[in-house]
Image (tube, coloured by chain):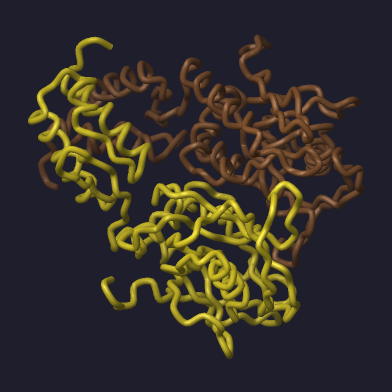
Chain colours: A brown, B yellow
């Protein structure tokens, strides 16, 4: 395409911005590609920013100076987020999800990329001021939510494994007590997958006593990395919880296997707290 | 936003289309939201389609009739895809990846959401004519690629597990021989996670003898589901391969632990074959 009409230019800019969350694109890149004045580019960016904000889909951030440019910060308006969480609670409250032992079937939700994108969008919004370097999760169910979140934060994912394989190379291992089974398990992370001092967000699908999250924290400690947040999709109240500071989207308040009843409420994600 | 200027309208339409691959949006939805004539909407869609195609980012598909509308079909121009695969081969050819036993370290690549999106885009393009209902993978390393692909095909992911837990509900289990370790293992999928007759794409990170993929095929057979494709990021030649028809992005042609040498070439993805 040699000559770019304004509408085509706008289309192409949005495409590039939305596909590359947090990636800084210098204005000169746009100006050169479309053979347009920087002032016209800036006007276009203002329009894109306005629409993204008004539709609750994040915003553009402009960085001034020679190394400057513009980048897309994904976000989720609080009303949109409330609707998604409300829907999540309703879906989780279905008695058909109750499994023997009082567990809940979640695999359908965790298999749906559209749903995951919305969950990831909420976590990415909640933790967007934390300058996150990486997202850490544990196999298996936490993985999809971790990737959905990391993609929108523009950072990599590290997966801790219970059964590490030779394909991880050298690993760091800690021991952890899984709250639900009280079983002592090993939890390992590949040595080259995290760097010292990294600011890490822990993401998992479910937390009860918090043994797994505590294990992940211990692992990060071994790496001298910093836990800057913990996000779980679903929490279930437990005595002696091992983790205090976390963000949950939903909370199981009652589960009765005999009566086939499960009650799920909104988690602490919308509670007032520092900065949020 | 009450009144929509053309540029704002365009921005908002692109946003909705790109965020919802394969989801059909009726033109009336756009016409009503922006209080615009359908003819103007159609003009905008033509521009968006033209830019997406020329930038190798897929296309718009218009479905005529009362139940019609427009949807975004993600895609990847073949030159873009070649560049990504070339880059993949170069990255994989680094001797630092060689692990004891002749394995390759892949976790850094499989942790990078931007890279995964590009890999998923290639698979989604290769298999886009197959009317896929679901993507099936196996824990742990296949999961990120499976999600990246499924997100761009607009379908759910099912994860087969070696160690299934109570949280899967009832499962279907088969036995499989892992080619590399010749170990007999169980492979299970939650009963409710796949429906009879589903058209399923199998995605994994690595294939040697193909024992795992063969196990996934056996599982699909139990569900009376249909395997419509197999995609692996990396293959390594093996005698007595258990799977014949697959698409690979890259191929390990030599790996020498002693000499610290690894050679990786482009896989069969760009080979001529039926329809492609």
Nearer to me, B11 or A219? B11
Give the percent coordinates (x, y) of residue A26: 35, 34
Q: Quadrant of the C terminus of chain A?
A: top right
Tally of marks: 0
Picture quarter containing residue A162? Answer: bottom right
Q: Note whether residue A63 is visible.
A: no
Q: Is residue B272 left or right of residue B179?
A: left
Q: Nearer the viewer, residue B232 or A195?
A: B232
Residue B80 placed where, x, y %? 32, 58
Tell me if residue A54 comes above or below residue B241 in the rendering: above
Instruction: Classify residue A153 as left or right of residue A210.
Output: left
Residue B18, percent across and down? Answer: 33, 39
Q: Residue at x 80, y 25 (%)?
A: A237
Q: In the current view of this chain or complex, which residue is farthest to the front?
A: A259
x, y (%) of residue A174? 87, 48
Q: Can residue A17 be seen?
A: yes
**Closer-to-camera residue (B143/A155):** B143
Give the vertical position of B182 relative to A239 (above or below): below
């Amino acid at each position: 395409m040699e000559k770019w009409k304004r509408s085509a230019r706008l289309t192409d800019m949005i495409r590039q911005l939305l596909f590359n969350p947090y990636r800084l694109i210098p204005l000169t890149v746009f100006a050169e590609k479309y053979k347009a004045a920087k002032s016209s580019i800036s006007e276009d960016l203002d329009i894109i920013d306005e629409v993204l904000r008004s539709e609750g889909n994040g915003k553009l951030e402009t960085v001034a100076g020679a190394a400057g440019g513009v980048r897309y910060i994904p976000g989720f308006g609080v009303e949109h987020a409330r609707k998604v969480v409300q829907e999540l609670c309703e879906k989780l409250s279905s008695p058909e999800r109750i499994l023997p032992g009082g567990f809940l079937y979640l695999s359908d939700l965790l298999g749906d990329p559209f749903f995951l994108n919305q969950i990831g969008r909420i976590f990415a919004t909640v933790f967007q001021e934390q300058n996150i370097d990486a997202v850490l999760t544990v196999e298996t169910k936490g993985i999809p939510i971790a990737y959905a979140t990391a993609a929108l934060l523009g950072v990599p994912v590290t997966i801790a494994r219970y059964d590490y394989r030779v394909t991880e190379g050298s690993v760091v291992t800690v021991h952890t007590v899984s709250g639900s089974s009280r079983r002592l398990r090993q939890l390992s992370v590949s040595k080259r997958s995290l760097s010292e001092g990294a600011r890490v967000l822990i993401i998992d699908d479910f937390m009860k006593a918090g043994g797994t999250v505590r294990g992940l924290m211990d692992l990060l400690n071994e790496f001298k990395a910093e836990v800057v947040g913990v996000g779980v999709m679903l929490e279930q109240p437990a005595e002696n919880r091992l983790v205090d500071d976390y963000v949950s989207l939903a909370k199981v308040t009652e589960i009765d296997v005999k009566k086939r009843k499960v009650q799920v409420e909104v988690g602490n994600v919308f509670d007032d707290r520092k900065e949020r």
